[in-house]
Image (cartoon, rainbow, N blue to C red):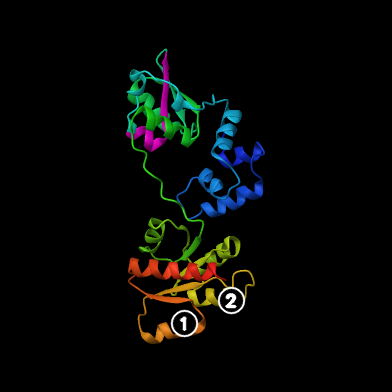
Amino acid sequence: MARKKMGEILVENEIISQGDLDQALLRQKGSNQQIGKILEGMDVVLEKDIATALSKQFGFPRVKKISQHRFPQTVLDKIDSKTALEHLIFPLKIDNNTLYLAMSNPLDMALQSDLSFKLAMQISPCVATPDEIKAAIKKHYSADIPVEKKVSSQIILLIDNQDNIVEEALKKEGYTVFVARNGADGLKIASQLHPQLIITNIVMPRMDGVELFSVLQTSGEIDKTPVIALSAITSAEEEYRLLEMGFFDFIAKPIDPTRLLARARRALKYYENL
């Protein structure tokens, strides 16, 4: 029997609606975020809701306030702080060669299998929120918890059929970026997500950047969204042509990340002031 996915569990337990899940799954496309994080960013679910759903659905013990308890060093030594931080896990106790482990994702069977083999012990998962686990690690391992870079609520849609540095630069800056590889897919995502900024290559298959822009201008919902054109044609005539069409800005390839980020910030500020 196939294991249910996190989103299905949350819908089944009436923590989120099917509509919320559908929107989150759409936002997940082209990003590396887990569905739980996306739902949290949408303000429709909390970490504790996810933990409660997992506990109820699969019978995992729910552990809370683990930072307030004492743990023998022999237990803490089973998991090093780096592994604990990387996977958001925390060792709770050992009983009859079984290690009881607080996990933010107790459905990670691969991790449990690896730890069981490495430690020559059985792993018994319990569920805790990421914040609860981080607090316990910080207290009991004296580890510095890295500050997570705030993910911007501003959505940027990148439409480009080539691998380039644009996506990497935008994500590094903290923007939420969704990627489409052609104009047709980009148009579909734009109409559903209503991004605050669209960055599109001009030369693409199925629908190029100019065709995409023309269709966007006929949409009453996203016709005001600023669109930045990327083009390998670096002539002044090409820049003039695209700006005259109504593109918000023009960036010639190869892309300079500093210039890209400056133009993106300018476009997003423009959108905020609409």
Viewer-closest of 180 and 149: 149
Q: Where, quadrant-wise, is the C terminus in this rendering?
A: bottom right
Q: Are there few (<14), some (14-19), or many (20+) residues within 10 Å of tag 2?
A: some
**CA gap, disc 2 and disc 1:** 14 Å
Viewer-closest of 137 and 36: 137
Judged left or right of residue 100, residue 10 is: right
* Residue found at x 49% / y 68%: 269
Q: Which residues are magenta?
A: 82-95
Up-down relation of residue 248 to residue 44 (above or below): below
Helix, strand or loop status at disc 1: helix
Q: Which mark is residue 84?
A: none
Helix, strand or loop status at disc 2: loop
Is the Cβ of the residue at disc 2 closer than 8 Å to that at disc 1? no
Does the magenta-highlighted stretch encompass residue 251?
A: no
Up-down relation of residue 148 to residue 206 (above or below): above
Residue under circle 1?
243
Q: Kindly indicate the quadrant of the structure image that contains residue 92.
A: top left
Q: Position of residue 271 (x, y in %)?
A: 53, 69
Judged left or right of residue 52, residue 126 is: left
Visible in this render: residue 129?
Answer: yes
Q: Kindly indicate the quadrant of the structure image that contains residue 236.
A: bottom left
Q: Which mark is residue 217?
A: 2
Q: Where, quadrant-wise, is the N terminus in this rendering?
A: top right
* Residue found at x 41% / y 50%: 149
The amino acid beneath tag 2 is Gln
Q: Earlier in the sequence, mark 2 or mark 1?
A: 2
